Image (tube, coloured by chain):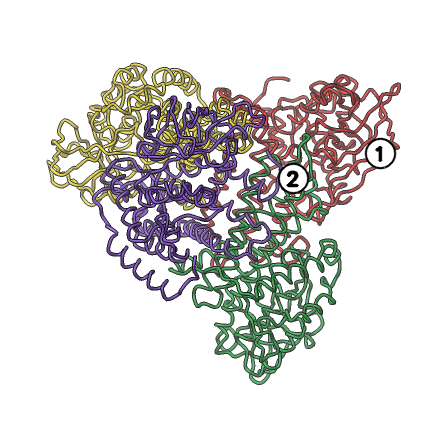
Chain colours: A green, B yellow, C red, D purple
Amino acid sequence: MENLGRIGFSEEQADLLEVAESFCRERSPVERVRALIRDSLGHDPAVWQEMAELGWLGIAIPEAYGGVGLGLAEVVPVVEQMGRRLMAGPFVSTTLAGQALLAGGTEAQKAAWLPRLAEGMPATLALMEADGNWDLEAVTATAEGGATLSLSGQKLFVENAATAGLVIASVFHDGAPALVLIETEALPDGALRRETVIDETRRSFELTLDGISVPSSQLLDTGKARAALSHIHLAANLLATAEMTGCTQACIDYTIDYLNTRKQFGKLIGSYQALKHPSVDAYVTYEQARSHLYSAAHSFTEQGTGEVATRMAKTAADKALSFAADRAIQFHGGFGFTYDCDAHLYRRRAIWHASQHGDAAWHKRKLAQMLL
Amino acid sequence: MENLGRIGFSEEQADLLEVAESFCRERSPVERVRALIRDSLGHDPAVWQEMAELGWLGIAIPEAYGGVGLGLAEVVPVVEQMGRRLMAGPFVSTTLAGQALLAGGTEAQKAAWLPRLAEGMPATLALMEADGNWDLEAVTATAEGGATLSLSGQKLFVENAATAGLVIASVFHDGAPALVLIETEALPDGALRRETVIDETRRSFELTLDGISVPSSQLLDTGKARAALSHIHLAANLLATAEMTGCTQACIDYTIDYLNTRKQFGKLIGSYQALKHPSVDAYVTYEQARSHLYSAAHSFTEQGTGEVATRMAKTAADKALSFAADRAIQFHGGFGFTYDCDAHLYRRRAIWHASQHGDAAWHKRKLAQMLL
Amino acid sequence: MSEVNEKELAEFAAEADAWFAENVDPDPGFMLPLTFMEVGTDQQFDFLRQWQNKVWEAGYLGAAWPREYGGGGLPEAFQRAATKAMRKHNGPIMLNAIGLNWTGPLLLDIGSEAHKAKYLKGILSAEDIWCQGFSEPEHGSDLGNAQTRAVREGEEYVVNGSKIWTTQGNYAKYMILLARTDPDAPRKYDGLSFFLAPMQIPGVETHPIRKLTGEYGFTQTFFTDARIPADGLIGAEGEGWKVAMRTLEYERGARGGQPGGYVITERDAFDVLDLARRMMRGGEPLMEDPVMQDRLMDFIIEIQANRLCQERQKVAPLTSDRPMGLALSSKLMSTELVRRLNEFAVTLTGPRAGYYVGDENAVDEGIWARGYLNAFSATIGGGTSQIQHNIIGEHVLGLPKS
Amino acid sequence: MSEVNEKELAEFAAEADAWFAENVDPDPGFMLPLTFMEVGTDQQFDFLRQWQNKVWEAGYLGAAWPREYGGGGLPEAFQRAATKAMRKHNGPIMLNAIGLNWTGPLLLDIGSEAHKAKYLKGILSAEDIWCQGFSEPEHGSDLGNAQTRAVREGEEYVVNGSKIWTTQGNYAKYMILLARTDPDAPRKYDGLSFFLAPMQIPGVETHPIRKLTGEYGFTQTFFTDARIPADGLIGAEGEGWKVAMRTLEYERGARGGQPGGYVITERDAFDVLDLARRMMRGGEPLMEDPVMQDRLMDFIIEIQANRLCQERQKVAPLTSDRPMGLALSSKLMSTELVRRLNEFAVTLTGPRAGYYVGDENAVDEGIWARGYLNAFSATIGGGTSQIQHNIIGEHVLGLPKS
């Protein structure tokens, strides 16, 4: 329990943070975010193309597979800035699909798919099921057969599935959890149902696996499946934490702006301690969460420490964003109760992220098992 | 889970509340409380005598045994007002000793002792042991032998033992927990050691049972021992809750007075929302606790409901008093950090009561077992 | 009102129980709003209007209001029995909340005979829907600063300005309106007057407001040279602030006079308990998690506390230290609890908290997240929780003004 | 200062480690104070003064201060290594806190050559104990309103008034003193001046203050026509407020310049963890209780957050949005955490939380309850947590003044 994670920040992280800050600010003003909510695709393909050209889709992919050869630590500042601008799109799901291939794919699979992801083919993961278990090894969907595998089961919260060229699904196969590649071209009609999710900036789908067959070559390395699932779980939490942290910052800034503009009883409402002091609490909690985020990013690849730092970071981010966004609605008063106020966008996102890949109580329990 | 307790308030309760309010206010101004802290006895025998004359020591003792024939519901307003004035003395421990006799004594024991308690003989209970288990059945002290019982073991937190004529101790006897009467006259030299406790208004002792022998006639009815211990546990919590509730009220009043007197930056500090709003939170939490207290008092004798209402009330009182007293220190600023400020008297009492007869977490766990 | 006849009361209660058992439709085929502020569709509105009318006709709403104004003329205990039966059988809410709980008690208290005769019965029957026009877009919590103007011209006032958060504004026939009749009054509060104003007249327009839930339920109301009759003035000209404050006391529960029923059905601890029992976490029943149990107990204890505080208000010796304390605290206590309870319930649903109203996989059709978001209407509306803290701090604890 | 030579640094660190391993006495035979504000007996004072002197003489305090003033003239990294070794071996606190962390950095920053030569070495050696005279009995948080008067007479100022919360006031040789030199200044802040004032002169009296713990550690200081030399003025007459604010920034951690060591040893999560491991509840090890585990994890996560925030302050790209944010928040974050952590620790001790310092049955000699009560000195002193909220709200978030 000596090392719970430390702050470290590379030059590459600093550069990416700076570039991503201006890119996301310019490409994703809130009017655009709101327009994309009403759009069925939900993100801007031109912006996606730009990201590919910036090399962002390959940040954590080795150069041998067409990537930049850095790690998730360098993806974090990019995702943080996306979260800050409520930016929509398949960046995170594609990055995680790449991680799944890296952690669990065969050499052939990596060579075949990673370059395509780095070039801009969206991809996603299909992990969750109806019983709502955050433990990714608790899989009930199945892949049965020999040379050809017949899939069955339901997968929930498959983000960006309609856009993705590739879905990597967890299945139970041969007495153990496994991962399987599904090309979305091969999906039968009706396999995808768009879900109505709390965070309207996202596109999420229910995927019915029944009736889908894939050649057994699309099974990821079964010997690495458990390790890959564990890696995916932590990587998903790391990137969710990055999104949440950026989102918290924006939520606080947005609220502070209002407190500095709106008057009641003849005074700017930000002069009232009833609003000022909880805003300070939100801010301090945000700074704590951000410190955890960059500790998790820096320590992510260290055995043990990475898991500890990541689970702590997700817990801290959940606390920070939930509190900041809850108070954002309240402190905007009547306006906060309207759809026009952005406060609910942050609050909805907070609920989304808290609910995916383990909430604070879940991570604390896992941490207690590791540390106490 | 239909009935978790209800508010009811008898005429006798109302009368006692009114009389106790003025009696305790007059007999226990804070200067007196502070003088008694420095006094080795720790309470005023003349006031004790007055209480006996008012009939308070027999409120919950049946008329047949020289009491008033009411119940603990009527003791509650008296103890609440004592708590409000930080009044010291063996009232609660004597009342609880009476309850132990009523719940677990033989007819002969009740006839012999209850009238003496009602007349003003202080008494107390010896329950806790070094392992710190709030479960009163987990006794390790022993009583062994036939016609004469040899006692052994250590008892902690025996309140008012130096004043008491009678101690009722829990012991392990004949394979089960039991209660035994010990006349303090019979205590060997050195059996009592005055403890240094957090609440300096109290007098509490460690009692060494080794070397004490009592005739077996001083064993309470062994068939009733478990029920008696359970009754004592709940009665002790009910009266602690009453003390805590009165204490919370006083703590809030004391703080509000300061907020209405002290100026900083040219304004009364009570005008700052940073102090005003948490004071309101303390007040609201106090009112909730007081409602629970009078529900517990009213429902105490109802099987099941009494236990639920009492455990809830203790939990609510712990929350209210701890918060109010913690904020009382803070809101008194520099003065709050001095011994001269009363805030620490309330905070110390809060810690004392939270630690005795089960804290909030303990009671919630018991409630969960009953209700969930 | 007459003395309570215990036998008659028991019979009435039994009849009410049977009536609600018979008449509450457990599934009207669409989602009913949980509060009067959430009436978002005509289908909901029509259903609830008929339901209120039916309850009133059966004698279970306004049972304690005077007979001559459409009430039952019975002692309060009868209405309490009826409301209890309504609650027991999960009856839908009473629709006409502003009329029932604000306008009605106000008119009974200080209205003229003509006002009572004209308005009370329509309030009970739900024929006349009422709304409230206090808040303005620029002065949310600062009611005393209302700028909507009402200028007297003969037997009318000409109204110009805008009100916001008008619940059921698009359905209402009348509004209780706070408007400025004297912009030059030395104290801003003295320039206000209080009106019973018609809504369905020229110059009054309502625009629906989209709530943070994505749904509707409130409007913004615009007045453009709208002419309202001068006999709708309640209190004298310039006394509007006093009347409005009195009205808010009905809302805050600090005065009686309500006709019964309820206008909000809150999910309580038992609903949350039921939810927790149905959830799993990590393959285990969530209810077996001691951390969850501990938090649930906190909520149950707090809910019970609030319930007991309501009861204790009636026991004078137990409220003598700060007589208005419980009454003035109840809005803060209850609305903040509802917000936190719904927030907690959302977390109980685990991964499926990702779903929202409208998804087939949403737990309980998504009511928990929606309920949480809607809960802000009560922590913001009718004086924010921050304002409530000021009120309690100043009026109960006697602290100086901020 | 020279570049860091990594090899020399490693050698220095190893030597420091060995030195503290050798010289820290794990049991001096009496209870040492955890913070410089808790020095309540002569025995404690004498021990700590000798200890600081010894550490300084060994070169492990002020290693980065200039050689000419008693420092080691080494790069900062050397002192950090020494402090780390001190902490690792649980060395007692550095006694002369005000001198080391307030006066010293101030003089190094803006003191005259004469001041530096006269005072700095005595600060490091603990020969000259310093105290601080900012707060006054009637104006706790309102430093700008200080009323202690200093009137110039020739080469002296005549001081009258009273200061409170003078830590080690009864031992101090010098005080940093904020006094009013111009009562008629239009802005109250402009009438203040800042002095290095001798304490052991006629007209200065100190009275011990009994703390809420029952112990001592602070004094109130009374000035009655006390004559202090005019060359102790720091900054110009009337600039005292600016100098005092600068001094507070050293305390709040917003500026560097400290000579190393620590003046507070805080119980941290690991101590609390260790405590939890030793406790039983209901016959079971307390650490097996999931509710306790959940709360412990909250604390561990928060403590780690604060530690990481300290580290992150040094990473410019990660603090660019609000550059002063972390520095100005650190006092609030750390002091409130200490209060809550000690409060929690008290509850961990179960029934034995009933005992206090001095009882043989008290868990860990009662340090948890005492630590909790003492924690208020930091949430109140040096600007209350409420004032800290204002500072952060206004100076970091840019909100308007309250």
The answer to whether any part of residue D336 appears in the image is no
**Chain of the residue under the numbered disc 2 shown in the image:** C
**Image location of residue B305, percent across then percent down:** 42, 36
Q: Which amino acid does label 2 sit on?
A: Gly
In the rendered image, the residue lying farthest to the bottom is A147
**Image location of residue B326, percent across then percent down:** 42, 34
Q: In which quarter of the image is the C terminus of chain C?
A: top right
| Lower position in the chain sequence, tag 1 or tag 2 | 2
> For residue C237, which quarter of the picture?
top right
Q: Mark number for residue C204?
A: 1
**Image location of residue A98, percent across then percent down:** 59, 73
Q: Quadrant of the N terminus of chain C?
A: top right
Which of discs 1 and 2 lies nearer the camera? The answer is 1
Apparent side of residue A224 relative to residue C175 in the rendered image (left or right):
left
- Measure the C-alpha gap from mark 1 to mark 2: 34 Å
**Mark 2 = which residue?**
C91
